[in-house]
Amino acid sequence: MNQVCTKGLAITLFIWISGLAFQLLFNVPTINMNKGFLNILLMYFIIDFSLTIVWSLMHLPFSKQGMELITSGPYALTRHPFYSAFIWSGTGIAFLLSLSWVVLFSVIPISIFWAWHIRDEEQFLIEKFGEKYHQYIFTTGQFFPKFKIGENKRK
């Protein structure tokens, strides 16, 4: 696992735990949610998280990172699907296990942190793959797919 990933996951975990500590320290009310709905959402996020991680690693194993530009599979949707799984589904799981408003809204600083944290990785990829990576940036979202509204598909 690369250093960016390891450090980023540690900071993400720290933000979730800090959110829980803040929740407890300041007695912030938790969210009331129907148990059945909570379980359905929890299963959704666990499945999404697991499938995204496995799918990402199938297309780009750690041993091949930085060697070739992969734009297929989950990488056709986002440039960093592995990290996206932690930002979106990981935060969803942490939220549903804690029912904490603070953990729910931690997705904002976590997203900002990751965008800042991977600058060097993105710069390395630009230097390594040049115009191909610039085009990839233009067409593919960093952590969330880019949706083209009103674009004519039959060009």
Image (cartoon, rainbow, N blue to C red):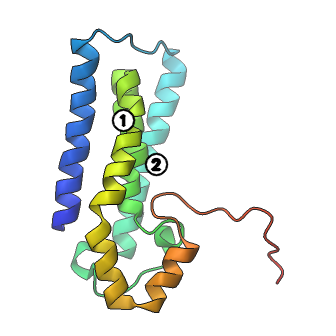
Name the spot of residue 6 as percent of width and height, x first.
17, 58
**Nearer-the-camera pick, 51 or 88:** 88
Give the residue pinned by disc 1.
106
Q: Residue at x 24, y 73 (%)?
A: 62
* Tag 2: amino acid: Asp
- Graded by Cα atoms within 10 Å as few (under 14), some (14 to 19) or many (20 or more), the crowding at tag 2 reads some
In which quadrant is the N terminus drawn?
bottom left
**Nearer-the-camera pick, 8 or 26:** 26
Q: Residue at x 29, y 8 (%)?
A: 27
Rendered image: mark on residue 12: none
Name the spot of residue 87 as percent of width and height, x first.
38, 48
Q: Are marks 1 and 2 in contact (CB under 8 Å)?
A: no
Rendered image: mark on residue 48: 2
Q: Relative to residue 131, is residue 30 depicted above or below?
A: above
Q: Residue at x 27, y 81 (%)?
A: 64
Q: Relative to residue 50, is residue 80 depicted above or below?
A: below
Apparent side of residue 81 relative to residue 154 in the rendered image (left or right) = left
**Closer to the observer: label 1 or label 2?**
1
User: How many callouts does the rendering have?
Assistant: 2
Dividing the picture into quadrants, the one containing residue 153 is bottom right
* Tag 1: amino acid: Ser
Name the spot of residue 116 as percent of width and height, x first.
32, 58
Q: Residue at x 32, y 88 (%)?
A: 127
Q: Secondary structure at mark 1?
A: loop
- Graded by Cα atoms within 10 Å as few (under 14), some (14 to 19) or many (20 or more), the crowding at tag 1 reads many
Name the spot of residue 7 as percent of width and height, x first.
17, 56
Q: Earlier in the sequence, mark 1 or mark 2?
A: 2
Distance CA(mark 1)–CA(mark 2) = 19 Å
